[in-house]
Amino acid sequence: MKKALILPLLLLVFASYSEASRLSSVNGFRTKSYKNHSRIIVELDRSVEFTNNRLSKPDRLYFDLKNCMLQKKAVRLMQVDDGILKTVRVAQFDKNTVRLVLESGKTKSFYAFILENPYRLVIDVYDQRNAEPAYNQRNENIVPDLGEIKKIVIDPGHGGDDPGAIGPNGIQEKDIVLSVGKKLGDILTAKYEAEVIFTRNKDIFIPLNERTETANSKKADLFISIHANASPKKDTRGIETYFLNWTDDKEAMKVAARENKISFKKMEKVQGDLQMILQDLKRKNKNEESMKLASSIQNAMVSTLKENYSKIQDLGVKYAWFYVLIGAEMPSILVEISFVSNNEEEKRLAEDAYKDKIAEAIASGINSYITQSTLIVKKMNKGI
Ligand SMILES: [Zn+2]
């Protein structure tokens, strides 16, 4: 008898528990204003179904997020007043529905879609009818958009007492990479509206570990370390991009040893010691993402430079233990833009036009990484 009573009770408790656990949590929202559209980003912990509708007097759009629970600490109301949106507010509409209300002017078109990694509902509201979605990179009329990735750390290698590699005609790595870093910063800010943080923007020495600490403490989204390569073989040339990982590739280890300012022998030993904590580092460093970022940048570099210069060599994406990447808590890469030890590449590195192209290529590599990694559109609503 007893057993018969307990079982339905247990089932009931279990059923209501699992229903609660099925609710997705809405952690808050933020907004960003662009030239021709406003963006609302709703932070979620998983993908959600949503519907949308329009109300008038005053004109407003609303989105109902199904099976959602609004977190207590979430911001409820935001005054936007950017000419497209007036206010955005969010509330628990009923037990399972969170409603987002956008108060706007008249006849705005919008696109709403779910992005992953992390999950979020993105709503782009336009000030005209039939606007193209901002993320549609194929349409050249659309302003490039780095989407969610806002803070990018640019780390020009070396500096101060540390010149880095020196070319046969005396060109110093520290000067070249600072110049490319600044150009990259200008492009990311002006063209892509990103926030850029420099580990150094003048000729000073910064220890390797402090560079990632800056990125971590500022909660940066990406870390880009810029270097120029060197080889005892004068005819060695080309571009390669690294992310952090264990390697038994001797050439990659030599590059890392030079950048780490330690001997090849010590490099081998360090790597052996660090292998034990590899798994943890891989997780923290977002290894998969770093690899994708590295290949986007490498591909963009090679294709952009090949369009304008002869004998551009693609040395590929590689990995090794670079001190400057250890400890970075965001996708992080190190790009070796060319060889200062090669006569022709040294000459090119001295020219502004070549450095401009490199900076443009790195920026476009960053942009295509972001576009690929975030554009997993689960569901898209379009409305006018
Ligand atoms: Zn370097």
Image (cartoon, rainbow, N blue to C red):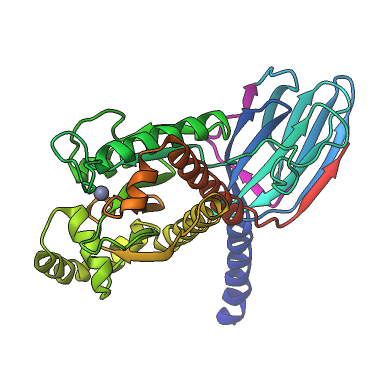
Tell me the quarter of the picture where residue 108 sits.
top right
Where residue 262 appears, x then y in whole percent?
Answer: 11, 57
Q: Which residue is drawn at 58% across and 64% down?
A: 13
User: Would residue 172 be found to the left or right of residue 352 on screen?
Assistant: left
Q: Is residue 219 visible?
A: no
User: Would residue 166 be found to the left or right of residue 55 on screen?
Assistant: left
Tell me the quarter of the picture where residue 1 sits.
bottom right
Where residue 143 appears, x then y in whole percent?
Answer: 68, 35
Q: Which residue is drawn at 55% across and 54% down?
A: 117
User: 45 or 125, which is in the foreground?
Assistant: 125
User: 379 or 89, which is in the foreground?
Assistant: 379
User: Would residue 82 be found to the left or right of residue 316 on screen?
Assistant: right
Can you say whether 269 is above or below 116 in the image?
A: below
Q: In which quarter of the image is the C terminus?
A: top right
User: Would residue 129 be found to the left or right of residue 189 on screen?
Assistant: right
Q: Residue at x 25, y 56 (%)?
A: 230
How many discs mark residues in the rendered view? 0
Where residue 274 appears, x then y in whole percent?
Answer: 18, 66
User: 68 or 318, which is in the foreground?
Assistant: 318
User: 171 or 51, which is in the foreground?
Assistant: 171
Q: Which residue is drawn at 13% across and 36% down?
A: 161
Q: Can residue 61 be seen in this view?
A: yes
Residue 210 on the magenta span? no
Can you say whether 304 is above or below 18 in the image?
A: above
Q: What stretch is highlighted in magenta?
A: 65-79
Where residue 299 appears, x then y in whole percent?
Answer: 52, 58
